[in-house]
């Protein structure tokens, strides 16, 4: 289907199962890919790039399974600009209700000279032939000029224009090596929009790598410049330093809708489940302070912050944890925590200490917090049972009547 998204909608093209999966430590078998694809469908991404069928029989089978079993998103498969790749992609995709063939060919001088050993003329010919071949198989064809951000803009424009004329309905501009900067990328997208014939009739997409930590910033800058598809991965996995992180792109657009005025169709409450499932399937852990999905993303330890969040969470939280699929914010009890947080957690555990009781347990709590990184609920229950004000039979197994003041 070649329909255009509404002007204020950006398509989310998830490539966790292709670019993400091809990165070291992230490979998945058929069963894992299928399970992840089902979660991506619950996440309501617009497109799932399920794999690169020409690469291996395993990938071909996985794409075939995702294409025939996963409902909702369009399913895409990657192909180089060679007939056998395009045919393999189509063979794997043909049972999808909405298949997309994604063909790519490097266009930068470096890649032309050292990787492909092809002249510009040959790049243009292969682009046209390959897009046309894919277009004979399905009407939904995406073309990517690999290393687009390092390609001479005039030549990039020429390649893109030919791809559109040959039938591509989505043109994706990759920052393959994560080299570009937001302002520069905006300039390139603007240049293409001004100079390429037919560009208003297709969906302009971007695909940014994170080598300089700019993937999300570049993707969002491109959206401001008119891109209406962003390619990204769950947890930002992908070649080398990874791809733009889906959760960061989506939550930036959602949280700063006032600034971007752009929506996605993503069901954001499925973000954390998707992140955790991917970690489980690949064994690749998410760094603790990772935006949106890291364990610390909604955790507060400092006493001043905890006090603020208890009064009004907006003081230190710009998103609601429920909106990304978390139960609630996490007030981590440690040496920086204050009485307000301790009282709140004791309340969660069923206690309602008076001032003296709280003071007493707070002293014991601080002493313990100096020795351990985090004070757990079990630690608190023990502290409560040990303090003079709260008899040992407290909440744990003792029932409310046994403790000093559990509610
Ligand atoms: O990074 C890249 O250029 C790619 C293309 C195949 C889109 O992954
Ligand atoms: Zn890539």
Image (spheres, rainbow, N blue to C red):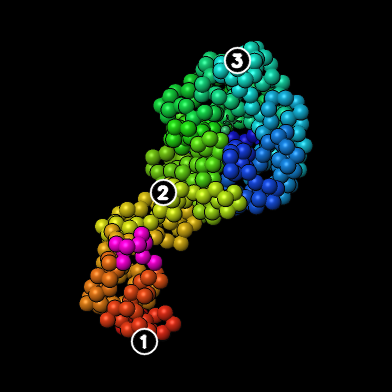
Crowding near the residue tagged with mark 3, few <14, some 14–19, many ≥20 C-alpha atoms within 10 Å: few
Which residue is depicted at the point 76% across and 28% down?
84
Q: Which residue position holds label 3?
A: 113
Callout 2 secondary element: loop
Residue beneath the point at 58% across and 43% down: 25
Residue 213 horizontal/vertical position (percent)? 44, 35
Quadrant for residue 201, please give it: top right
**Drawn side of residue 71 relative to residue 226, left or right:** right
Q: Residue at x 71, y 34 (%)?
A: 55
Residue 380 found in image quarter:
bottom left
Foreground: 176 or 138?
A: 176
Task: Indicate the secondary structure of the residue bearing disc 3.
Answer: helix
Left or right position of 374 against 360? right
The quarter of the rendered structure image containing the C terminus is bottom left
Whether pointer 1 and pointer 3 mark residues with C-beta atoms closer than 8 Å, the reply is no
For marks 1 and 2, the one nearer the N-term is 2
Task: Please tell me which residue is depicted at 24% across the width and 74% down the height of the picture.
Answer: 360
> Pointer 1: residues within 10 angstroms few (<14), some, or many (20+)?
some
The Cα atoms of the two marked residues, 1 and 3, are separated by 80 Å
Q: Is residue 88 left or right of residue 49?
A: right
Along the line of sight, which residue is nearer the eye, 78 or 55? 55
What residue is pinned by disc 2? 289
In this figure, which residue is indicated by the disc labeled 1?
402
Q: Which mark is residue 154?
A: none
Q: CA distance from mark 3 to mark 2?
A: 41 Å
Q: Which residues are magenta?
A: 368-376
Residue 399 magenta-drawn?
no
Q: Is mark 2 within 8 Å of ligand 2?
A: no
Q: Is residue 115 in sight in this rendering? A: yes
What is the quadrant of residue 349 in the picture?
bottom left
């Amino acid at each position: 289907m070649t329909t255009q998204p509404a002007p204020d909608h950006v398509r989310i093209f998830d490539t966790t199962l292709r670019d993400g999966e091809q990165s070291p430590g992230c490979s998945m078998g058929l069963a894992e890919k299928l399970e992840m694809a089902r979660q991506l469908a619950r996440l309501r991404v617009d497109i799932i790039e399920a794999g690169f069928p020409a690469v291996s029989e395993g990938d071909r089978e996985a794409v075939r399974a995702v294409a025939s079993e996963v409902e909702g998103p369009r399913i895409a498969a990657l192909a180089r600009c060679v007939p056998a790749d395009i045919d393999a992609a189509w063979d794997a995709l043909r049972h999808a209700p909405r298949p997309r063939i994604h063909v790519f060919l490097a266009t930068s001088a470096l890649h032309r000279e050292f990787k492909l050993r092809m002249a510009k003329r040959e790049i243009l010919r292969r682009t046209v032939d390959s897009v046309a071949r894919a277009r004979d198989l399905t009407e939904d064809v995406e073309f990517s000029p690999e290393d687009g951000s390092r390609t001479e803009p005039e030549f990039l424009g020429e390649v893109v224009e030919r791809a559109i004329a040959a039938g591509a309905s989505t043109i994706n501009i990759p920052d393959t090596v994560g080299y570009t900067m937001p302002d520069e990328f905006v300039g390139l997208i603007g240049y293409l929009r001004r100079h390429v014939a037919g560009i208003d009739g297709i969906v302009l997409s971007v695909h940014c790598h994170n080598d300089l930590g700019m993937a999300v910033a570049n993707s969002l800058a491109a959206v401001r410049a008119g891109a209406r598809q962003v390619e990204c991965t769950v947890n930002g996995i992908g070649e080398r330093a990874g791809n733009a992180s889906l959760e960061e792109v989506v939550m930036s657009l959602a949280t700063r809708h006032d600034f971007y005025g752009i929506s996605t169709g993503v069901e954001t409450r499925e973000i954390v489940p998707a992140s955790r499932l991917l970690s489980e399937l690949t064994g690749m852990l998410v760094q603790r302070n990772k935006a949106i999905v890291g364990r610390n993303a909604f955790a507060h330890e400092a006493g001043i912050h905890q006090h603020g969040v208890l009064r009004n969470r907006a003081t230190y939280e710009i998103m609601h944890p429920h909106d990304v699929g978390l139960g609630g914010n996490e007030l981590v009890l440690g040496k920086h925590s204050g009485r307000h947080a301790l009282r709140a957690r004791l309340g969660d555990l069923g206690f309602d200490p008076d001032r003296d009781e709280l003071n007493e347990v707070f002293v014991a709590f601080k002493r313990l917090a100096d020795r351990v990184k985090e004070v757990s609920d079990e630690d608190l229950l023990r502290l409560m049972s040990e303090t003079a004000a709260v008899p040992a039979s407290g909440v744990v197994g003792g029932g409310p009547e046994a403790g000093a003041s559990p509610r």
